[in-house]
Each structure stands twice: as structure tokens, then as C-alpha cells.
């Protein structure tokens, strides 16, 4: 419902001077003037930038975005704050932020510059601090109640009457329907167990038939009703040698009943990465559990190729050693290597969620203070006479850079990366198994386990694998997203509580950070930092992923742009995937059926661009990086992530994305050239095939020609034989120049003539089919019926040869009679 508007209120516009805002009193150069109410548009309901089911609930006219010195209209919707540039309906990205992505907001005033007229009223400002590294400041016209009304509207967003008022449910699944994540978890388990041919289904989940196994590990449905551990997934991968009863007993020895279970197993060596919470060893560190020790020892399976030799087990405690010992006072603690077979305890020294929260806040303040422009609209080069950034003063430049180190953010990133590299090296090089835990096993443990899987398994470096990794280690194993990211949480009353709070201050400094070196930023009592469970643990993990991508730019299918868009979708709470604190809570709230899917949305974005989409890494080379990534210690020096950390404070610097864009354009051209090459190769193959067929036809023609020549030779020989045979009968054979042959038979006054064609066989076949009449009565080739027996003259030739023989005999006897004197009388 649109908030009621006071028609009698004075609408004012902001006209700002073309003069640059410089110095501490930069806001005082702004000139507020009255503007005719009719000049403002009364409705923005048909904006093209509005999402499905997004509706405007409040409108502020004549607002200025102090960061960039732009005037415009501020709209509050049921999903976000939308800042539209003056004179257009285009949203300004910096001034547009989802409601759930707001960490805190403060309303304040800035007094007029003492050098200017004291009649100028104070400037009413609203500072909005985002969870995505930006600090936004909106300026409101004096003499209006727009700021107060906006703050009231924002506060109403933190007290929703119904769960379905949240935008993720208002929008619904839409076209981004969410497939049941339980099926995807089982499919990932099947892949790890070498049963990739199996496909999970809801029927399989309902009847419990997913309990498959291999030689060492099995899937159990012991937690199908979440009775064993409410924060674990419904299906667990455990050692095959451990029964469900033993698992139940072992769970009582771990905090939150988060017993040791398998997160990943090596398909070749059999090594595993397991996860759990801290053991409940107590203050004296003397409590033990035989079931827990047996379960942990079962991870030390026999090494391949080594008869009877068990593999080594490392127990990686993510906490500093002193913190682990301090937890003993509350019943927790850490394991003793003497109680666990083949084990070695290692402490990584990673700080807790509270240290990460303060570090993130100091990093954000540092970037706002020393960026290109900050939330007060002043360049860091000009603030306080330039002392914050040099003017050639190297010591001041070094001092400003040292503030980045004092934030501790990069040091925390390096500690996590060092621990991850150590785990990956133990598994890949020693074929050892590693059990990872911290206190509760859902913050630092999840960071280490998921990053180690990312290094060891190239599947997780693809789009599908990244989704499977996040859903398995972060969502299924119960990272409390609602508490850590400050998302809507399930309260006892069944409603959601947004962690947006308001605080007031009498004045607003020229820069948000004004503190001595090494001290923490002062937090207002109502800020979300006061919420004890808020901490950017998942953002820190995504930052670590970006560091690995910087080290191995060709090993990941996705690009840094994909990580930024993925993080923005998560922080906006536009989709339901990351709501609630566990799989059990999401199932009870029916999140899957009632909201859209982040993964489906990102997949839909990529479908329009294919491999040339901004989410795809143009340098990806899976054949080169098809195994484990083991970064050396020297490569683990982190740096700021430009695409995320610097996109608001230093918008020019992240133009590493411009280089990426050029690389992508070159990749597109390369792809086009590759397609052209493939098309040319296809044409060459077609031409080669045509040439081959023509060569084959030519060979056939040559064979036919050769056969014809042979036939011609045989025909000549046959013609000669026939000619001699005919001539032996006393006939004349005449050949013309054209090759025609005529046979003349003379017998007294009668004469018969026969023509022999070129093709003897044709002549024979035609003579057989047609009866020719012989007119010569005494022709040797004349039959009784009067027909000609040519070329059936075989019999005639035979008779002729007999006649010739008789004639020869007669002539011989005649010669003998002449010389009868040779015969003596008897």
C-alpha cells in the first residue's frame, strides 16, 4: 500500500552549483530553491526498471546523492531504495540498494559553513551503510519532512506483520522455480561415492532408498527427521564400518551434536575431508568418548598399495590455541592426539566472527575515506588540504596505506588461504585424511572445508560444481546465513526480523571515519554491529575464492563478475535459497516452494550470452587444470578484490573489468574466427570428398576404357578370324574406311551380300533377334526356310571346312593320278 502523502507539503528541488564541492564545508555550496509542484511526476508505477511484483511505497522529490553530487528522486519500494537521476527515469547504481542489503542508517544534520550566511538552515542528511562495501548519503531539502517520513518507512520494513510480506515471497518462484535442494545434495553424494549413474528423486527421499555405499563410506538416513542434529542435512556420509547406533552415541560428545561426518573423499586414494564441531572435553581436557574416538579413527582407512598400513589423520582446529583452551571453561575444547589413532593436532589461528565483523567495518571505512570520492562527496586528494593522500608527502601516503593493514582484513584472508593450502597439500601429497572443526563447526570450518574442496576437485571450479559446493558445505551443513549476513530470521512468533536499525547524531563529519590509527570505528548503539551474530563470514569466503582465481586465472569456468553478481543476489534477499539458518528451517518454512531460485536466475542470465557471457571465464582451460591446485606459500599474498571492494569507492580502478571486457571481446572474435576456421575446414572436407569421388569416377572410367580397349582388341582378332573363315568359303570380305564390313558370296549368276557392323557382339545379338532373308539360292549361309544363317555360320564354316578338305583330297588324288607310274604293278 502506498504511504499517504500530505498534499500541503512543500516540494522542493535541489539546484546545485557547477562549482566542485571541496573542503569540509562542501555541502554548503548547495543552493536549495523552490520548484513548482506540477513539474514533478506524480507516478512512477510504470518504470521499466521495476521488477516483478515490485511496488513503490514512498516517494521523495528533490533529493541529492551526496556521493556523486547528483540530484534526483528517491523511491522506496517493497524491495529496495531506488534513486532516479533528475530529468530521467534512469536509476543511479550507487544510490540504489536493496533493503535487506542495508546494514544500518543514520539521520544527521550538517551545519552551515561559518564563512557563509547564518540564515542558511542545516542540511538534512541520511547516511545508509550497505553490506556490500558502500556508504551512501542522501541530502533532503530543508523545511520538509521527507527524511523523517522515509526513516519511518524504513523502520516499518523491520517490523513486517507477515512472513509473506518479504519481497522474496511476494515475487514468488516466477520462472526461476527452485528444484528441491535435497535431490542435488544426494546427487553430489552419489558422485563422491562413484555412483554417478544414480539420480536422486523425491520418491527416493521419501522411502529412504538413498542409503547407498561403496567399499569404505555410506549414506545414512539417521538424520532424516533432524532428530540427531538439527543443523545438519537430512542425509550424512559416514564410514561404512560405523553403525547408526554408534553415530548417535558419538554425537553427544560434540557441540550442537555436530558429529564428525565426511564432506569430500578422494576417488583415487580414499583420503577424506571430514568436518565437525569442537569436542566436549571440559575444563580439565580429560573427558573422552569411545564412540567419538572410534568414529574419527575410521577415517584412517588402509592406504592403497600398503598392506595393513593405515593412513595418517590430521585434526585441523581453525581457532587460535588459546581460544580453544578458553572454550574448555564452557565445556568445549580440543582433542588430544594421544586419544585419537594416527592423529596430529594443528591450530590455524583464525579469529572468530566478532574480529571479522570489526575488520570488515574498518575496511569499508578505509575505502570510503581514501577512495576516489567518499560519502561526503569530497575527493580524498582534497580532504583536509590533502594530508590524507600526499601531495608528494610520502609519509602521509604510507600512513593512509597502513590503515588498510590495520583493518586486518587481508591478514585474515591470508590466514584462511594458508590453512586451506595446508589441508589440500596433506590430502593430495600424503593421501592423509583431515578432520576440520572450530567451535560450532559452521563458520571457519565451512570456509576451510569448502575452499579445500575447491582446490582439490576441479569439478567444483565449474558452474555446476560451484553450486553443488555451496549447497553442500554452506547450506546443507547449516551455516547460519540469517544471523551472519543479517538476513530475515525466523522468530518465535513466526515472523521475520530485519536487522535494519536507525540511529541519530547531532552532526555528520566530513568523512565517515575519523579515528586514530588502530582504533575501531565507533558504532552506534542501534547499529547492526550491536547484533552479536552478524559477521561477513560468507563474504570473506567469496573473497578467498577471488584470490584463488587471481592466482589461477585459467582454472575456473566462472569469472569474477559472476562472483559479484552472485554475492549481490545473496545480499539482496531477492531469492529464497539463503534464507534461514539451516536446512531444517528452510524446509519448515517451505522456502523452496514459495520463492525463486538464485541459481536458476544466474543460469537464465548466462543462457542469453553463451560462452561469451560476462559470467564465463574466457581464459578457462580445463585440460590444463584437471587436478589439484596447490599454491605455494609465496603465492598466498592477498590483495583487494577490485570488482567488489573498489567498485563504489574507486569506480575507475575496477576497470580491470575493462581489460576483462577487452579480453572477452577478443575471445568472441577468436570464437568467430574459430567458427570460420571450422566452416572452412568443413568446406575443405567437402571439396576433398568431391575430389575423391571424382578420382574414383576417373578410376572407373579408366577401367572402363581399359576394358573397352581389351574388347576392341578381342573384336579385331575375332574379325580377323571371321574374315579368314568367310574367305575360306570363297567369299569376299570388304572393309570400308568407316569400319563397315561387307561379305559377298558368289555362286554362279547369284550373289549375296552381308554387312558386319563394328560391334560384332551387337551384330550377333541383332541377327539373333531378327531373321534376315537370303536371296541367293546357292549361298552356303542360306537355310532351308530361305533365311540367312549369318552369323550362325559355325555350322556353315564347319561344312565349308569339310568341303575344303574333300577338295584338297580330290586335288591330291588328281596329282597322284598324274604320276601313277610311281605305283608298281602287282
Image (tube, rainbow, N blue to C red):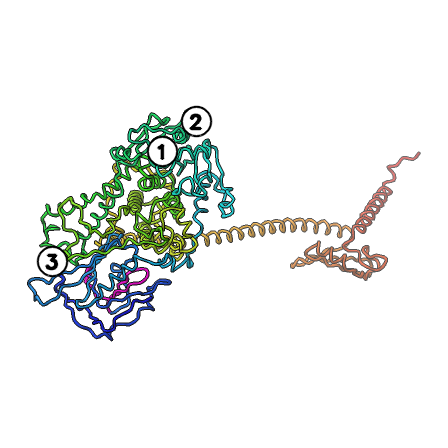
Residues shaded magenta: 66-86
Q: Which residue lies furthest to the top in this view?
A: 308
SS assignment at label 2: loop
Q: Is residue 596 left or right of residue 42?
A: right
Quadrant in which residue 502 is drawn? bottom left
Front of the two marks 1 and 2 = 1
The residues tagged by marks 1 and 3 sit, at their Cα atoms, a distance apart of: 55 Å
For the residue pair 375 and 159, the one nearer the viewer reads as 159
Residue 83 among those drawn in magenta: yes
Q: Which residue carries the number 2 mark?
A: 305
User: Where is residue 56 shown, x and y percent of the image?
Assistant: 31, 65
Q: Is residue 602 above or below residue 1?
A: above
For the residue pair 761 and 774, the one nearer the viewer reads as 761
The residues tagged by marks 2 and 3 sit, at their Cα atoms, a distance apart of: 72 Å
| Figure disc tally | 3
Q: Which residue carries the number 1 mark?
A: 434
Q: Residue furthest left?
A: 115
Amino acid at each position: 500500500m502506498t504511504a499517504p502523502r500530505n498534499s500541503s507539503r512543500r516540494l522542493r528541488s535541489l539546484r546545485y552549483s557547477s562549482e566542485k564541492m571541496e573542503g569540509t564545508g562542501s555541502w554548503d555550496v548547495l543552493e536549495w530553491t523552490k520548484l513548482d509542484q506540477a513539474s514533478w511526476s506524480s507516478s512512477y508505477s510504470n518504470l521499466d526498471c521495476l521488477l516483478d511484483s515490485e511496488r513503490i511505497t514512498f516517494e521523495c522529490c528533490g533529493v541529492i546523492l551526496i556521493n556523486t553530487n547528483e540530484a534526483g528522486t528517491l523511491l522506496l519500494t517493497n524491495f529496495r531504495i531506488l534513486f532516479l537521476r533528475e530529468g530521467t527515469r534512469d536509476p543511479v547504481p550507487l544510490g540504489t540498494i536493496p533493503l535487506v542489503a542495508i546494514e544500518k542508517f543514520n539521520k544527521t544534520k550538517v551545519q552551515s559553513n561559518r564563512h557563509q550566511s547564518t540564515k542558511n538552515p542545516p542540511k538534512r542528511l541520511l547516511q545508509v551503510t550497505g553490506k556490500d562495501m558502500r556508504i551512501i548519503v542522501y541530502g533532503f531539502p530543508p523545511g520538509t519532512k521527507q527524511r523523517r517520513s522515509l526513516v519511518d518507512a524504513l523502520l516499518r520494513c523491520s517490523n513486517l506483520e507477515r512472513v509473506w510480506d518479504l519481497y522474496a515471497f511476494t515475487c514468488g518462484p516466477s520462472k526461476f522455480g527452485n528444484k528441491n535442494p535435497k535431490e542435488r545434495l544426494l546427487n553430489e553424494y552419489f558422485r563422491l561415492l562413484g555412483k554417478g549413474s544414480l539420480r536422486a528423486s523425491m520418491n527416493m527421499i521419501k522411502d529412504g532408498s538413498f542409503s547407498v555405499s561403496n567399499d569404505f563410506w555410506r549414506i545414512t538416513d539417521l538424520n532424516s527427521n533432524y532428530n540427531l542434529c538439527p543443523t545438519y542435512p537430512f542425509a550424512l556420509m559416514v564410514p561404512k564400518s560405523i553403525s547408526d547406533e554408534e553415530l548417535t552415541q558419538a554425537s553427544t560428545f560434540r557441540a550442537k551434536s555436530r558429529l564428525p561426518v565426511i564432506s569430500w573423499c578422494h576417488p583415487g586414494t580414499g583420503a577424506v575431508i571430514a568436518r565437525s564441531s569442537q569436542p566436549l572435553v571440559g575444563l580439565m581436557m580429560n573427558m573422552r568418548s569411545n564412540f567419538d574416538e572410534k568414529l574419527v579413527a575410521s577415517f584412517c582407512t588402509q592406504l592403497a598399495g600398503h598392506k595393513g598400513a593405515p593412513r595418517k589423520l590430521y585434526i585441523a582446529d581453525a581457532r587460535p590455541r588459546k581460544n580453544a583452551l578458553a572454550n574448555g571453561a564452557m565445556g568445549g575444547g580440543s582433542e588430544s592426539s594421544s586419544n585419537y589413532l594416527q592423529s596430529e593436532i594443528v591450530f590455524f589461528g583464525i579469529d572468530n566472527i566478532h574480529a571479522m565483523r570489526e575488520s570488515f567495518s574498518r575496511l569499508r571505512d578505509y575505502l570510503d575515506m581514501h577512495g576516489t570520492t567518499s560519502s561526503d562527496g569530497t575527493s580524498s586528494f582534497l580532504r583536509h588540504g590533502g594530508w590524507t593522500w600526499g601531495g608528494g608527502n610520502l609519509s602521509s601516503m604510507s600512513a593512509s596505506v597502513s590503515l588498510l593493514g590495520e583493518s586486518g582484513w587481508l591478514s585474515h584472508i591470508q590466514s584462511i588461504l594458508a590453512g586451506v593450502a595446508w589441508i589440500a597439500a596433506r590430502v593430495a601429497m600424503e593421501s592423509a585424511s583431515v578432520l576440520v572443526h572450530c567451535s560450532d563447526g559452521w563458520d571457519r570450518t565451512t570456509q576451510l572445508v569448502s575452499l579445500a574442496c575447491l582446490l582439490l576437485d576441479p569439478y567444483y571450479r565449474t558452474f555446476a560444481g560451484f553450486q553443488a559446493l555451496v549447497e553442500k558445505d554452506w547450506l546443507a551443513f547449516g551455516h547460519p546465513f540469517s544471523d551472519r549476513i543479517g538476513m530475515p530470521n525466523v522468530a518465535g512468533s513466526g515472523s521475520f526480523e530485519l536487522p535494519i536499525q536507525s540511529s541519530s547524531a547531532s552532526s555528520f563529519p566530513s568523512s565517515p571515519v575519523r579515528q586514530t590509527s588502530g582504533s575501531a570505528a565507533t558504532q552506534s548503539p542501534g547499529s547492526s554491529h550491536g547484533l552479536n551474530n552478524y559477521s561477513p563470514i560468507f563474504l570473506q569466503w567469496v573473497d578467498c575464492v577471488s584470490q584463488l582465481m587471481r592466482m589461477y586465472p585459467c582454472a575456473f569456468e566462472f569469472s569474477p563478475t559472476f562472483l559479484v553478481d552472485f554475492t549481490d543476489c545473496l545480499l539482496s534477499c531477492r531469492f529464497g535459497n539463503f534464507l534461514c539458518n539451516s536446512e531444517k528451517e528452510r524446509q519448515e518454512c517451505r522456502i523452496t516452494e514459495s520463492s525463486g531460485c538464485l541459481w536458476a536466475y544466474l543460469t537464465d542470465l548466462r543462457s542469453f550470452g553463451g560462452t561469451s557471457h560476462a559470467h564465463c571465464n574466457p581464459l578457462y582451460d580445463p585440460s590444463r587444470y584437471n587436478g589439484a591446485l596447490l599454491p605455494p606459500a609465496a603465492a598466498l599474498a592477498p590483495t583487494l578484490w577490485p570488482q567488489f571492494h573498489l567498485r563504489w569507492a574507486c569506480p575507475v580502478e575496477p576497470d580491470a573489468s575493462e581489460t576483462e571486457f577487452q579480453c572477452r571481446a577478443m575471445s568472441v572474435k577468436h570464437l568467430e574466427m574459430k567458427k570460420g576456421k571450422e566452416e572452412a575446414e568443413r568446406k575443405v572436407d567437402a571439396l576433398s570428398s568431391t575430389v575423391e569421388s571424382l578420382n574414383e569416377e576417373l578410376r572407373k572410367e579408366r577401367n572402363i576404357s581399359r576394358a573397352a580397349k581389351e574388347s576392341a582388341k578381342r573384336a579385331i582378332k575375332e574379325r580377323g578370324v571371321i574374315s579368314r573363315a568367310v574367305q575360306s568359303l570363297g567369299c569376299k570380305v570388304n572393309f570400308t574406311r568407316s569400319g563397315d564390313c561387307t561379305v559377298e558370296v558368289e555362286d554362279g549368276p547369284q550373289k549375296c551380300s552381308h554387312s558386319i557392323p563394328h560391334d560384332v557382339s551387337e551384330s550377333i545379338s541383332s541377327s539373333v533377334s531378327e531373321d534376315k532373308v537370303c536371296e541367293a539360292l546357292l549361298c552356303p549361309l542360306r537355310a532351308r526356310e530361305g533365311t540367312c544363317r549369318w552369323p550362325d555360320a559355325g555350322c556353315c564354316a564347319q561344312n565349308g571346312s569339310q568341303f575344303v578338305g574333300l577338295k584338297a583330297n580330290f586335288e591330291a588324288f588328281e596329282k597322284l593320278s598324274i604320276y601313277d607310274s610311281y605305283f608298281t604293278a602287282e
